[in-house]
Amino acid sequence: ETGVTQSPTHLIKTRGQQVTLRCSSQSGHNTVSWYQQALGQGPQFIFQYYREEENGRGNFPPRFSGLQFPNYSSELNVNALELDDSALYLCASSRSGIQETQYFGPGTRLLVL
Amino acid sequence: AQSVTQLDSHVSVSEGTPVLLRCNYSSSYSPSLFWYVQHPNKGLQLLLKYTSAATLVKGINGFEAEFKKSETSFHLTKPSAHMSDAAEYFCVVSGYSSASKIIFGSGTRLSIRP
């Protein structure tokens, strides 16, 4: 089975711009979660998608939005980028259910200048 | 509300000696608890998880953790450290509700001395 993949691996943007990050979930998984990991910190939960619907959200403003597609791949969109948005963005896929093991992708490193 | 606290930001042990990484949690209902490992420039990998079955959970690479409800702890242990265990370790708590947040601890960096 193929693992979780994310694109791009690295990205540089300037303040105020918009960015879209992509994630392909592992085969057989219908749930995707997104995390932000700032340097030297633990990942922070942004939101989770299950069957194309948002299924839980962390303390992130509405300029962080997402989509899940019928093939269970997902996008994370961030509008009006701020310097503090610079971080590693991790995607994890799993079967449905909060107890299920999440399988993480390698992440997208975003730098906002 | 849920929270998780990793009590040590950095732990250093000698190769061949035991490892103890401490994690305390807070949850208003029975949580699911996980330990993940993150090697430099690599993705997060699940070591083990507790989901209300046996309180002693065995994971990969010789790691295990014990769920102690009375102490609200889920410490990670390994009898004998190996150089390849050097990495960042995260304790994670989540609840049963589908809308629950998944909370990562701040991480413990494990260093192994030769």
Image (cartoon, coloured by chain):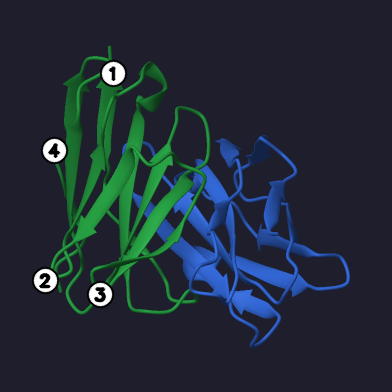
Q: Is residue B20 visible?
A: no
Q: Residue A8's mark?
A: 4
Q: Is residue A34 above or below residue A29?
A: above
What amino acid type should be assigned to the residue bearing mark 1?
Val
| Marker disc for residue A57 | none
- Residue appearing at x 52%, y 50% in the figure: B82
Mark pair 2, 3: CA separation:
9 Å
Q: Residues within 10 Å of mark 2 (few under 14, many from 20)?
A: some
**Amino acid type for the residue under numbered disc 2:** Asn
| CB contact under 8 Å: marks 1 and 4 | no
Decide: few, some or many residues near mark 4? Use Cα within 10 Å; few <14, some 14-19, many ≥20: some
Tell me which numbered mark, 2 or 1, is placed earlier along the sequence: 2
First in residue order: circle 2 vs circle 3: 3
Q: Earlier in the sequence, mark 4 or mark 2?
A: 4
Q: Is residue B5 above or below residue B75?
A: above
**Do labels 3 and 1 touch, CB within 8 Å?**
no
Query: The disc labelled 3 sits on which kind of residue?
Result: Arg
Q: Which residue in the structure is indicated by mark 3?
A: A51
Figure check: A15 above or below A95: above
Disc 4 marks a residue whose amino acid type is: Pro
Q: Position of residue B28 (x, y in %)?
A: 75, 69
Residue at image point 42% right, 71% down:
A101
Residue A71 disc label: 2
First in residue order: circle 1 vs circle 4? 4
Q: How far apart are labels 3 and 4 at the CA level? A: 24 Å
